[in-house]
Amino acid sequence: MKIADGVHVHFIPTQKYKTNRIVFRMTASLNKQTIAKRALASQMLATANQPYPTVQAFKERLASLYGTQLSTRVSTKGLTHSVDIELTYLKEAFIPSDNGLFWEVLGFLKDCLYKPLSRVAQYQNKVFDIEKRNLMTYLDVDNENNYYYSEVKGRELYFVNEGLKVPKYGQSKLVDVETSYTAFQEFQNMLTKDRIDIFMVGDFDEYQVLQGLHRFPLEGRQVDLQFSYSQPFSNVVKEKIEPRQSSQSILQLEYQFTCQYGDKDYFALIVFNAMFGEFAHSVLFTEIREKEGLAYSISSQLNVFTGLLEVYAGIEKDNRNQAIRGISRELNNIKLGRFSSSLLNQTKKIIRMNALLSEDNALTLVEQCFNKVIFEDKSLSSEQWLDNMEKVTKKDVCRVARQVKLQSLFFLEGVS
Protein backbone atom coordinates (compact mmCIF):
# COMPACT_ATOMS: atom_id res chain seq x y z
CA MET A 1 0.00 0.00 0.00
CA LYS A 2 1.54 3.31 -1.08
CA ILE A 3 1.24 6.17 1.39
CA ALA A 4 3.47 8.52 -0.65
CA ASP A 5 5.70 8.21 -3.71
CA GLY A 6 8.49 5.82 -2.73
CA VAL A 7 6.91 5.11 0.68
CA HIS A 8 4.99 1.86 1.18
CA VAL A 9 3.35 0.02 4.07
CA HIS A 10 2.87 -3.75 3.95
CA PHE A 11 0.56 -5.73 6.23
CA ILE A 12 1.58 -9.33 6.93
CA PRO A 13 -1.24 -10.76 9.07
CA THR A 14 -0.31 -13.81 11.14
CA GLN A 15 -1.35 -15.44 14.39
CA LYS A 16 1.86 -17.45 14.69
CA TYR A 17 3.50 -15.21 17.27
CA LYS A 18 2.71 -13.67 20.65
CA THR A 19 4.32 -10.48 19.40
CA ASN A 20 3.71 -7.87 16.74
CA ARG A 21 6.67 -6.66 14.72
CA ILE A 22 7.25 -3.34 12.94
CA VAL A 23 10.12 -3.20 10.46
CA PHE A 24 10.98 0.23 9.05
CA ARG A 25 13.29 -0.26 6.03
CA MET A 26 15.25 2.46 4.22
CA THR A 27 16.77 1.39 0.88
CA ALA A 28 19.13 3.26 -1.43
CA SER A 29 21.50 2.45 -4.26
CA LEU A 30 24.62 0.61 -3.13
CA ASN A 31 27.51 3.07 -3.02
CA LYS A 32 30.97 2.46 -1.59
CA GLN A 33 31.05 6.06 -0.31
CA THR A 34 27.89 5.75 1.80
CA ILE A 35 28.03 2.20 3.22
CA ALA A 36 30.00 3.15 6.34
CA LYS A 37 27.85 6.25 6.96
CA ARG A 38 24.67 4.19 6.77
CA ALA A 39 26.10 1.50 9.08
CA LEU A 40 26.98 4.19 11.64
CA ALA A 41 23.46 5.63 11.37
CA SER A 42 22.03 2.17 12.07
CA GLN A 43 24.21 1.97 15.21
CA MET A 44 22.92 5.31 16.45
CA LEU A 45 19.29 4.34 15.81
CA ALA A 46 19.60 1.48 18.30
CA THR A 47 21.49 3.43 20.99
CA ALA A 48 19.74 6.63 22.08
CA ASN A 49 17.54 9.54 20.98
CA GLN A 50 16.69 13.03 22.26
CA PRO A 51 13.92 11.98 24.70
CA TYR A 52 16.12 9.12 26.01
CA PRO A 53 19.67 10.44 25.54
CA THR A 54 21.62 7.69 27.31
CA VAL A 55 21.90 3.99 26.60
CA GLN A 56 20.43 3.24 30.02
CA ALA A 57 17.44 5.59 29.59
CA PHE A 58 16.83 4.18 26.11
CA LYS A 59 16.80 0.60 27.38
CA GLU A 60 14.66 1.46 30.40
CA ARG A 61 12.04 3.03 28.17
CA LEU A 62 11.91 -0.11 26.01
CA ALA A 63 11.62 -2.25 29.14
CA SER A 64 8.70 -0.11 30.36
CA LEU A 65 6.88 -0.94 27.11
CA TYR A 66 6.37 -4.50 28.34
CA GLY A 67 9.83 -5.53 27.26
CA THR A 68 9.64 -4.19 23.72
CA GLN A 69 12.78 -5.05 21.75
CA LEU A 70 14.52 -2.78 19.26
CA SER A 71 17.23 -3.79 16.84
CA THR A 72 18.75 -2.55 13.61
CA ARG A 73 20.04 -4.49 10.64
CA VAL A 74 21.96 -3.72 7.46
CA SER A 75 21.53 -5.78 4.27
CA THR A 76 22.14 -5.70 0.53
CA LYS A 77 20.12 -7.01 -2.39
CA GLY A 78 21.61 -6.64 -5.86
CA LEU A 79 22.83 -3.05 -6.13
CA THR A 80 20.87 -1.78 -3.12
CA HIS A 81 21.72 -1.18 0.53
CA SER A 82 19.04 -1.32 3.24
CA VAL A 83 18.95 -0.25 6.87
CA ASP A 84 16.16 -1.71 9.02
CA ILE A 85 14.96 -0.55 12.41
CA GLU A 86 12.78 -3.22 13.99
CA LEU A 87 10.48 -3.08 17.02
CA THR A 88 8.92 -6.22 18.51
CA TYR A 89 6.28 -5.90 21.22
CA LEU A 90 3.63 -8.03 22.92
CA LYS A 91 0.19 -8.34 21.39
CA GLU A 92 -2.65 -6.75 23.32
CA ALA A 93 -4.09 -10.16 24.24
CA PHE A 94 -1.11 -10.77 26.53
CA ILE A 95 -1.12 -7.44 28.39
CA PRO A 96 -3.69 -5.35 30.35
CA SER A 97 -6.39 -4.01 28.04
CA ASP A 98 -6.69 -0.45 26.77
CA ASN A 99 -3.10 0.50 27.55
CA GLY A 100 -2.35 1.95 24.10
CA LEU A 101 0.89 0.02 23.69
CA PHE A 102 0.77 0.26 19.89
CA TRP A 103 0.69 4.05 20.04
CA GLU A 104 3.55 4.19 22.54
CA VAL A 105 5.69 1.85 20.43
CA LEU A 106 4.93 3.80 17.28
CA GLY A 107 5.75 7.02 19.11
CA PHE A 108 9.08 5.57 20.21
CA LEU A 109 9.88 4.64 16.60
CA LYS A 110 8.99 8.17 15.50
CA ASP A 111 11.32 9.62 18.14
CA CYS A 112 14.17 7.36 16.98
CA LEU A 113 13.72 8.57 13.41
CA TYR A 114 12.83 12.22 13.85
CA LYS A 115 14.37 13.08 17.21
CA PRO A 116 17.80 11.47 16.89
CA LEU A 117 20.53 12.23 19.40
CA SER A 118 21.89 15.24 17.52
CA ARG A 119 23.06 18.78 17.98
CA VAL A 120 23.54 21.42 15.27
CA ALA A 121 23.19 19.09 12.26
CA GLN A 122 25.38 16.31 13.65
CA TYR A 123 25.15 13.42 16.08
CA GLN A 124 26.05 14.03 19.73
CA ASN A 125 29.81 13.45 19.64
CA LYS A 126 30.29 11.51 22.86
CA VAL A 127 27.81 8.73 22.03
CA PHE A 128 28.72 8.76 18.34
CA ASP A 129 32.42 8.26 19.05
CA ILE A 130 31.61 5.24 21.23
CA GLU A 131 29.45 3.68 18.52
CA LYS A 132 32.07 4.41 15.88
CA ARG A 133 34.72 2.63 17.97
CA ASN A 134 32.33 -0.27 18.57
CA LEU A 135 31.70 -0.69 14.82
CA MET A 136 35.41 -0.50 13.99
CA THR A 137 36.18 -3.08 16.67
CA TYR A 138 33.45 -5.34 15.31
CA LEU A 139 34.88 -5.08 11.80
CA ASP A 140 38.45 -5.62 13.00
CA VAL A 141 37.41 -8.75 14.93
CA ASP A 142 35.62 -10.06 11.83
CA ASN A 143 38.77 -9.55 9.79
CA GLU A 144 40.68 -11.74 12.24
CA ASN A 145 38.37 -14.61 11.25
CA ASN A 146 40.08 -16.36 8.35
CA TYR A 147 36.81 -17.47 6.72
CA TYR A 148 35.28 -13.98 6.81
CA TYR A 149 38.51 -12.39 5.61
CA SER A 150 38.78 -14.85 2.71
CA GLU A 151 35.16 -14.25 1.73
CA VAL A 152 35.71 -10.48 1.64
CA LYS A 153 38.93 -10.83 -0.35
CA GLY A 154 37.31 -13.29 -2.75
CA ARG A 155 34.50 -10.84 -3.47
CA GLU A 156 36.96 -7.99 -3.91
CA LEU A 157 38.72 -10.09 -6.53
CA TYR A 158 35.51 -11.19 -8.25
CA PHE A 159 33.27 -8.13 -8.45
CA VAL A 160 33.70 -5.32 -10.96
CA ASN A 161 31.26 -3.02 -9.13
CA GLU A 162 33.07 -1.11 -6.36
CA GLY A 163 30.09 -1.15 -3.99
CA LEU A 164 29.85 -4.94 -4.08
CA LYS A 165 33.50 -5.23 -3.08
CA VAL A 166 32.69 -3.70 0.32
CA PRO A 167 30.98 -5.67 3.13
CA LYS A 168 27.49 -4.45 4.05
CA TYR A 169 28.72 -2.83 7.31
CA GLY A 170 31.69 -1.24 5.56
CA GLN A 171 35.38 -1.55 6.33
CA SER A 172 37.27 -0.23 9.32
CA LYS A 173 39.23 2.22 7.15
CA LEU A 174 35.98 3.57 5.66
CA VAL A 175 34.33 3.94 9.07
CA ASP A 176 37.41 5.66 10.48
CA VAL A 177 37.13 8.69 8.18
CA GLU A 178 33.46 9.35 8.95
CA THR A 179 32.39 11.95 11.50
CA SER A 180 29.30 12.70 13.52
CA TYR A 181 28.44 15.30 10.86
CA THR A 182 28.85 13.09 7.76
CA ALA A 183 26.95 10.18 9.32
CA PHE A 184 24.10 12.44 10.46
CA GLN A 185 23.79 14.09 7.06
CA GLU A 186 23.59 10.65 5.45
CA PHE A 187 20.84 9.69 7.90
CA GLN A 188 18.86 12.77 6.85
CA ASN A 189 19.27 11.66 3.23
CA MET A 190 17.98 8.22 4.19
CA LEU A 191 14.80 9.67 5.68
CA THR A 192 14.08 12.00 2.76
CA LYS A 193 15.52 10.22 -0.32
CA ASP A 194 15.54 6.44 0.35
CA ARG A 195 12.76 4.12 -0.68
CA ILE A 196 10.88 3.33 2.55
CA ASP A 197 9.02 0.10 3.23
CA ILE A 198 7.20 -0.39 6.52
CA PHE A 199 6.27 -3.99 7.34
CA MET A 200 3.60 -4.73 9.95
CA VAL A 201 3.89 -8.41 10.93
CA GLY A 202 1.22 -9.82 13.23
CA ASP A 203 -2.23 -8.58 14.24
CA PHE A 204 -2.83 -4.94 13.27
CA ASP A 205 -5.77 -2.63 12.74
CA GLU A 206 -4.97 -1.26 9.28
CA TYR A 207 -6.89 1.97 9.79
CA GLN A 208 -5.09 2.56 13.10
CA VAL A 209 -1.70 1.94 11.50
CA LEU A 210 -2.33 4.30 8.60
CA GLN A 211 -3.65 6.91 11.01
CA GLY A 212 -0.44 6.58 13.03
CA LEU A 213 1.94 6.62 10.06
CA HIS A 214 0.37 9.77 8.67
CA ARG A 215 1.81 11.52 11.72
CA PHE A 216 5.29 10.74 10.37
CA PRO A 217 6.62 13.50 8.06
CA LEU A 218 7.10 11.06 5.18
CA GLU A 219 7.19 13.00 1.94
CA GLY A 220 7.22 11.52 -1.55
CA ARG A 221 10.51 10.74 -3.27
CA GLN A 222 11.65 9.31 -6.61
CA VAL A 223 13.93 6.29 -6.24
CA ASP A 224 15.42 4.19 -9.03
CA LEU A 225 16.88 0.96 -7.61
CA GLN A 226 18.47 -2.17 -9.11
CA PHE A 227 17.68 -5.25 -7.05
CA SER A 228 19.48 -7.60 -9.47
CA TYR A 229 23.04 -7.40 -10.77
CA SER A 230 25.07 -9.31 -13.30
CA GLN A 231 28.49 -8.76 -14.78
CA PRO A 232 30.04 -10.08 -18.02
CA PHE A 233 31.84 -13.40 -17.96
CA SER A 234 35.61 -13.21 -18.12
CA ASN A 235 37.67 -15.77 -20.03
CA VAL A 236 40.51 -15.21 -17.58
CA VAL A 237 40.26 -16.59 -14.05
CA LYS A 238 41.62 -14.07 -11.54
CA GLU A 239 43.92 -15.57 -8.90
CA LYS A 240 45.44 -14.21 -5.73
CA ILE A 241 47.46 -15.86 -2.97
CA GLU A 242 47.94 -14.13 0.36
CA PRO A 243 50.00 -15.55 3.24
CA ARG A 244 48.66 -15.19 6.80
CA GLN A 245 49.77 -16.38 10.20
CA SER A 246 47.50 -19.40 10.64
CA SER A 247 47.60 -23.16 11.04
CA GLN A 248 44.87 -23.52 8.39
CA SER A 249 44.55 -22.30 4.80
CA ILE A 250 41.32 -21.14 3.15
CA LEU A 251 40.44 -21.73 -0.48
CA GLN A 252 37.78 -19.32 -1.79
CA LEU A 253 36.37 -19.91 -5.27
CA GLU A 254 33.96 -17.53 -7.01
CA TYR A 255 31.72 -18.79 -9.81
CA GLN A 256 29.27 -16.87 -11.96
CA PHE A 257 25.88 -17.96 -13.29
CA THR A 258 23.39 -16.21 -15.58
CA CYS A 259 20.14 -17.23 -13.86
CA GLN A 260 18.40 -14.48 -11.88
CA TYR A 261 15.63 -14.45 -9.29
CA GLY A 262 12.36 -15.62 -10.82
CA ASP A 263 13.90 -16.98 -14.06
CA LYS A 264 12.76 -20.38 -15.34
CA ASP A 265 15.99 -21.99 -14.09
CA TYR A 266 15.80 -20.38 -10.64
CA PHE A 267 14.47 -23.50 -8.90
CA ALA A 268 16.96 -25.77 -10.65
CA LEU A 269 19.70 -23.44 -9.39
CA ILE A 270 18.45 -23.78 -5.80
CA VAL A 271 18.46 -27.58 -6.10
CA PHE A 272 21.88 -27.60 -7.79
CA ASN A 273 23.52 -25.57 -5.02
CA ALA A 274 21.95 -27.74 -2.32
CA MET A 275 23.33 -30.86 -4.03
CA PHE A 276 26.71 -29.28 -4.76
CA GLY A 277 27.75 -27.92 -1.38
CA GLU A 278 25.10 -26.19 0.72
CA PHE A 279 24.17 -29.09 3.01
CA ALA A 280 25.95 -31.95 4.78
CA HIS A 281 24.66 -34.51 2.27
CA SER A 282 26.12 -32.54 -0.67
CA VAL A 283 28.83 -33.92 -2.95
CA LEU A 284 31.47 -31.43 -1.79
CA PHE A 285 30.94 -32.44 1.82
CA THR A 286 30.67 -36.19 1.30
CA GLU A 287 33.38 -36.53 -1.36
CA ILE A 288 35.96 -33.82 -0.66
CA ARG A 289 35.68 -33.71 3.13
CA GLU A 290 34.43 -37.11 4.25
CA LYS A 291 35.75 -39.51 1.61
CA GLU A 292 39.01 -37.87 0.52
CA GLY A 293 39.75 -35.92 3.71
CA LEU A 294 40.98 -32.88 1.81
CA ALA A 295 39.07 -30.26 3.82
CA TYR A 296 38.33 -29.52 7.46
CA SER A 297 35.18 -27.78 6.28
CA ILE A 298 33.69 -27.08 2.87
CA SER A 299 30.49 -25.51 1.61
CA SER A 300 28.89 -23.51 -1.20
CA GLN A 301 26.46 -20.61 -1.12
CA LEU A 302 24.78 -18.60 -3.83
CA ASN A 303 23.46 -15.08 -4.10
CA VAL A 304 20.80 -15.10 -6.79
CA PHE A 305 20.63 -11.28 -6.73
CA THR A 306 24.26 -10.86 -7.83
CA GLY A 307 24.81 -14.03 -9.88
CA LEU A 308 27.55 -15.27 -7.54
CA LEU A 309 28.19 -18.81 -6.34
CA GLU A 310 30.93 -19.14 -3.71
CA VAL A 311 32.76 -22.24 -2.55
CA TYR A 312 35.01 -22.12 0.50
CA ALA A 313 37.18 -24.86 1.94
CA GLY A 314 39.38 -24.93 5.02
CA ILE A 315 42.39 -27.04 4.04
CA GLU A 316 46.07 -27.80 4.58
CA LYS A 317 48.05 -25.53 2.28
CA ASP A 318 49.74 -28.51 0.57
CA ASN A 319 46.30 -29.80 -0.47
CA ARG A 320 45.38 -26.70 -2.49
CA ASN A 321 45.75 -28.10 -6.01
CA GLN A 322 44.21 -31.41 -5.07
CA ALA A 323 41.21 -29.64 -3.50
CA ILE A 324 40.74 -27.42 -6.57
CA ARG A 325 40.78 -30.45 -8.84
CA GLY A 326 38.33 -32.28 -6.57
CA ILE A 327 35.86 -29.37 -6.50
CA SER A 328 36.10 -29.02 -10.29
CA ARG A 329 35.52 -32.77 -10.70
CA GLU A 330 32.37 -32.74 -8.57
CA LEU A 331 30.99 -29.74 -10.48
CA ASN A 332 31.66 -31.50 -13.80
CA ASN A 333 29.98 -34.66 -12.53
CA ILE A 334 26.79 -32.70 -11.91
CA LYS A 335 27.06 -31.01 -15.30
CA LEU A 336 27.29 -34.47 -16.91
CA GLY A 337 24.46 -35.93 -14.82
CA ARG A 338 26.70 -38.27 -12.86
CA PHE A 339 24.56 -38.27 -9.73
CA SER A 340 21.82 -40.53 -8.47
CA SER A 341 18.08 -39.95 -8.36
CA SER A 342 18.20 -40.63 -4.64
CA LEU A 343 20.58 -37.66 -4.15
CA LEU A 344 18.18 -35.44 -6.11
CA ASN A 345 15.15 -36.62 -4.10
CA GLN A 346 16.96 -36.30 -0.77
CA THR A 347 17.99 -32.76 -1.71
CA LYS A 348 14.41 -31.76 -2.46
CA LYS A 349 13.26 -33.14 0.90
CA ILE A 350 15.91 -31.12 2.74
CA ILE A 351 15.05 -27.94 0.83
CA ARG A 352 11.35 -28.44 1.59
CA MET A 353 12.03 -29.03 5.29
CA ASN A 354 14.22 -25.92 5.55
CA ALA A 355 11.71 -23.81 3.63
CA LEU A 356 8.87 -24.87 5.94
CA LEU A 357 10.98 -24.24 9.04
CA SER A 358 11.89 -20.77 7.78
CA GLU A 359 8.18 -19.91 7.63
CA ASP A 360 8.29 -19.73 11.45
CA ASN A 361 10.72 -16.81 11.22
CA ALA A 362 9.02 -13.42 10.98
CA LEU A 363 11.93 -11.98 9.01
CA THR A 364 11.40 -14.65 6.35
CA LEU A 365 7.85 -13.36 5.95
CA VAL A 366 9.22 -9.82 5.59
CA GLU A 367 11.68 -10.83 2.86
CA GLN A 368 9.03 -12.82 1.02
CA CYS A 369 6.75 -9.80 1.09
CA PHE A 370 9.55 -7.47 -0.03
CA ASN A 371 10.49 -9.75 -2.94
CA LYS A 372 6.86 -9.96 -3.99
CA VAL A 373 6.65 -6.18 -4.12
CA ILE A 374 9.94 -5.39 -5.87
CA PHE A 375 9.88 -8.30 -8.33
CA GLU A 376 6.11 -8.20 -8.86
CA ASP A 377 4.96 -11.19 -10.94
CA LYS A 378 8.26 -13.04 -10.41
CA SER A 379 7.41 -13.70 -6.77
CA LEU A 380 5.46 -16.81 -5.80
CA SER A 381 3.53 -17.98 -2.76
CA SER A 382 5.18 -20.55 -0.49
CA GLU A 383 3.04 -23.31 -1.98
CA GLN A 384 3.91 -22.31 -5.53
CA TRP A 385 7.59 -22.06 -4.60
CA LEU A 386 7.64 -25.60 -3.18
CA ASP A 387 5.65 -26.95 -6.11
CA ASN A 388 8.10 -25.49 -8.62
CA MET A 389 11.04 -26.86 -6.67
CA GLU A 390 9.51 -30.36 -6.69
CA LYS A 391 9.20 -30.22 -10.49
CA VAL A 392 12.96 -29.80 -10.99
CA THR A 393 14.38 -32.72 -12.98
CA LYS A 394 17.85 -34.18 -13.35
CA LYS A 395 18.04 -32.59 -16.79
CA ASP A 396 17.21 -29.17 -15.28
CA VAL A 397 20.00 -29.47 -12.71
CA CYS A 398 22.53 -30.44 -15.40
CA ARG A 399 21.46 -27.51 -17.56
CA VAL A 400 21.83 -24.91 -14.80
CA ALA A 401 25.14 -26.44 -13.63
CA ARG A 402 26.55 -25.81 -17.10
CA GLN A 403 25.94 -22.08 -16.57
CA VAL A 404 28.35 -22.07 -13.63
CA LYS A 405 31.84 -20.86 -14.55
CA LEU A 406 34.86 -20.18 -12.35
CA GLN A 407 35.84 -16.51 -12.37
CA SER A 408 38.22 -16.01 -9.46
CA LEU A 409 40.28 -17.91 -6.91
CA PHE A 410 41.55 -16.49 -3.62
CA PHE A 411 43.87 -18.56 -1.46
CA LEU A 412 44.66 -17.56 2.11
CA GLU A 413 47.86 -19.50 2.69
CA GLY A 414 48.39 -20.36 6.32
CA VAL A 415 51.98 -19.97 7.46
CA SER A 416 53.53 -20.86 10.79
Image: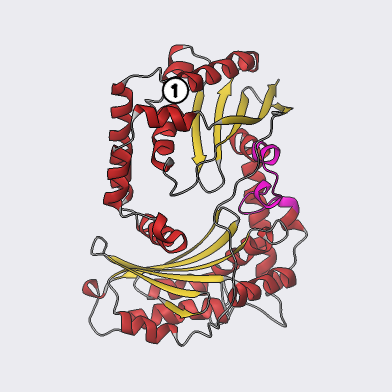
403 versus 11 height, above or below: above
Which residue occupies 62% across, 74% down? 193
Q: Secondary structure at mark 1?
A: helix
The foreground one among 227 and 216 is 227
Question: In the drawing, does residue 412 fall left or right of residue 372?
Answer: right
| Image quarter hosting the N terminus | bottom left
Question: In the drawing, does residue 327 fall left or right of residue 2?
Answer: right
Q: Quadrant of residue 114?
A: bottom right
Residue 279 in view of the camera: no
Which residue position holds label 1?
A: 334
Q: Amino acid at mark 1?
A: Ile
65 versus 18 height, above or below: below
Which residue occupies 62% across, 54% down? 169
Residue 130 horizontal/vertical position (percent)? 66, 63
Does the segment drawn in magenta span residue 4? no
Residue 413 horizontal/vertical position (percent)? 69, 24
Q: Range of the magenta residues?
A: 154-173
Tally of numbered tags: 1
